[in-house]
């Protein structure tokens, strides 16, 4: 039975960013789903960029791609993973996209002569989009994450939208603040004062939070709960402890210790339909029991800005590896290797010997590619399980062309503009767009169908002959070279239905235990309870090789 009024939960951040607002939203959404409701999640990004496609991943984190081709914030990936469903562009907006719509409407005389103002027209457009997404998703409850932290100039209009919505639907809107409680080393005590200030700042935007999620290293003690309750004008039952956890997939179970789901539903006047949290309990248990460990090298070129950025730039790859690992009952220890190291000192590539698997994720540009190719060569020759994602596939084709198919000067159009040996090239329709300088439109984006060749590693892993996967790239395997590559032993095990575009390359099992690359990004569709088949297979082979060898 569908509920009468749609419900909306806004989630804002207090004190500082990077404390897990996205995974908190995702966990709340997952818990409410487990209690029997149709739930969706939206992200509002306060950037003027119209989408995330033009943002540098080292600054903003991974560009996540949806089925419909929307390039968006990595949190959309968290929502998909926790909600176990694919979302659409209706669930993502930026300041830029909101303003764009308002300005276009104004130009089309849609405001009928009215003076168009930042308030109320911008928040009204935000509200229109939130309601539209809820309708489209048939969501009974929408969880809406407002990017940034309160007190920032740039998200104030989104807080205004939340405030206006709360007036519009007083019984159907909740506001959750995800705050941070530091434990300074020198003091050794958890401090609540920054949270108090953050709530006061939110109050000055006309909003009183209904829940405060207290993120910290440790659990909140009773004294801190009481303090927050008193100074932040909130009942202590609605202050939820959120200590650090080993795995984000423990979060739903952890939140449920404080009965967050029940409390939210009670505030929204909803009754629990079912209690299906078992799935999350199971995965939490499974993770706890794992003892075996695999060493995985991730080789790329975005790594120069320090470790923190790394995990954000490749979050879906990291999560997909984890999903594959959890279901193979192993842990994975990832080592990030900057490919430039192998250009400076080619002999350093020998260090790859100690790894159980090698992954080359997506990337752009020519910097560092020769180092990556060197690493791929090492993986191929030394029979280390290899998984190449997008650029990782293209560079594997180049390596093979150079060293196995006799095309010694093989390259990509992206690396060398004027070469006769572009085994990776730009397709004619993309080229036209590039010439017009329409860079935003030059990528192949979103979900495309591919067919799989029978009896290949890919077909066996998917256990299917037709797949849909998400893309984000400009270049493709050049049809001119396909025959030569195949003759030399390379197998294109996935291709577009018209057979023009090569989607998966692999080497026969007799030659290499697992050497496979995908033109698409399988990591975007991997889910904790339903790992992506290629990641599952990659980890399975790596595990088998490591632990069989020891026997
Ligand atoms: N740079 C390559 C291309 O544009 C690969 C892109 C990627 O890895 N996402 O085709």
Image: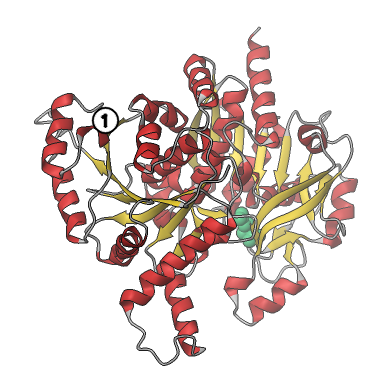
Relative to 130, residue 50 above or below: below
Quadrant holding ligand 1? bottom right
The N terminus - image quarter: top right
Determine the residue located farthest toward the bottom in the rendered image: 113
Report whether the residue tagged 1 is closer than 8 Å to ligand 1. no
Count the marks. Answer: 1
Q: Quadrant of residue 533?
A: top right
From the image, tell me which residue sits under label 1.
217
Question: In the depicted view, which residue is nearer to us: 430 or 365?
Answer: 430
Q: Position of residue 417 (x, y in %)?
A: 66, 70
**Looking at this view, is 390 or 207 the one in front?**
207
| In the image, farthest residue toward the top | 551
Which residue: 52% across, 89% down? Answer: 108
The location of residue 182, given as percent across then percent down, is: 19, 37
Q: Quadrant of the C terminus?
A: top right
Which of the 4 image quadrants contains residue 19?
A: top left
**The quarter of the displayed image where residue 514 is located:** top right
For numbered disc 1, what is the local secondary structure? Answer: loop
Q: Is residue 528 above or below residue 407?
A: above
Q: Is residue 226 visible?
A: yes
Side (left or right) of 386 relative to 245? right
Tell me residue 171's x, y (percent): 35, 51
Question: Does any portion of residue 74 appear in the rendered image?
Answer: no
Residue 515 shown left or right of residue 452 in the figure: left
> Residue, x 37% and y 39% (percent of image)?
264
Q: Where is residue 80 drawn, in percent x and y?
A: 55, 45
At a point 87% along the width and 42% down the height, the residue shown is 453
């Amino acid at each position: 039975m569908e509920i009468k009024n749609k419900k909306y939960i806004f989630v804002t951040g207090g004190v500082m960013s990077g404390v897990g607002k996205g995974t908190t939203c995702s966990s709340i959404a997952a818990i409410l789903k487990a209690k029997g409701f149709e739930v969706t999640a939206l992200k509002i990004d306060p950037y003027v960029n119209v989408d995330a496609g033009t943002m540098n991943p080292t600054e903003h984190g991974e560009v996540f791609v949806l089925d419909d081709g929307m390039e968006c914030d990595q949190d959309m990936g968290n929502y998909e993973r926790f909600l176990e469903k694919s979302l659409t562009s209706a669930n993502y907006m930026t300041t830029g996209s909101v303003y764009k719509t308002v300005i276009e409407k104004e130009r089309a005389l849609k405001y009928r002569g009215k003076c168009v103002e930042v308030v109320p027209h911008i928040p009204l457009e935000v509200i229109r989009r939130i309601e539209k997404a809820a309708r489209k998703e048939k969501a009974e409850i929408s969880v809406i994450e407002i990017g940034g932290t309160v007190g920032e100039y740039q998200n104030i209009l989104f807080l205004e939208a939340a405030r206006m919505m709360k007036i519009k639907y007083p019984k159907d809107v909740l506001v959750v603040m995800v705050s941070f409680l530091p434990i300074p080393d020198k003091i050794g005590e958890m401090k609540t004062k920054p949270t108090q200030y953050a709530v006061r700042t939110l109050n000055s935007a006309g909003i009183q939070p209904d829940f405060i999620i207290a993120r910290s290293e440790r659990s909140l003690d009773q004294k801190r709960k009481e303090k927050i309750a008193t100074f932040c004008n909130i009942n202590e039952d609605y202050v939820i402890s959120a200590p650090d956890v080993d795995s984000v997939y423990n979060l739903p179970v952890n939140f449920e210790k404080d009965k967050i789901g029940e409390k939210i539903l009670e505030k929204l006047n909803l009754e629990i339909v079912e209690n299906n949290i078992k799935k999350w309990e199971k995965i939490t248990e499974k993770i706890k029991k794992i003892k075996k460990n695999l060493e995985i090298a991730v080789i790329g070129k975005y790594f120069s800005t320090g470790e923190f950025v790394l995990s954000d730039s490749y979050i879906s790859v990291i999560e997909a590896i984890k999903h594959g690992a959890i279901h193979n009952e192993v842990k994975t220890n990832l080592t990030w290797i900057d490919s430039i190291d192998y250009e400076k000192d080619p002999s350093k590539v020998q260090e790859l010997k100690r790894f159980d698997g090698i992954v080359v994720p997506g990337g752009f540009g020519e910097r560092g590619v020769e180092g990556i190719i060197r690493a791929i060569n090492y993986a191929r020759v030394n029979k280390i399980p290899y998984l190449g994602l997008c650029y990782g596939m293209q560079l594997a084709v180049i390596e093979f062309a150079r060293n196995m198919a006799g095309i010694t000067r093989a390259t990509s159009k992206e690396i060398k503009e004027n070469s006769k040996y572009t085994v990776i090239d730009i397709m004619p329709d993309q080229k036209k767009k590039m010439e017009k300088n329409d860079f935003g439109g030059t990528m192949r984006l979103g979900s495309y169908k591919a067919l799989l060749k029978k009896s290949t590693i890919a077909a066996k892993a998917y256990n299917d002959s037709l797949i849909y996967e998400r893309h984000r790239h400009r270049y493709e395997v050049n049809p001119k070279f396909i025959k030569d590559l195949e003759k030399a032993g390379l197998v294109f095990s996935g291709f577009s239905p018209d057979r023009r575009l090569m989607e998966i390359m692999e080497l026969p099992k007799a030659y290499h235990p697992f050497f496979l690359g995908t033109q698409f990004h399988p990591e975007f569709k991997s889910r904790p309870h339903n790992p992506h088949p290629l990641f599952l297979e990659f980890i399975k082979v790596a595990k088998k090789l490591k632990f069989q060898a020891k026997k």
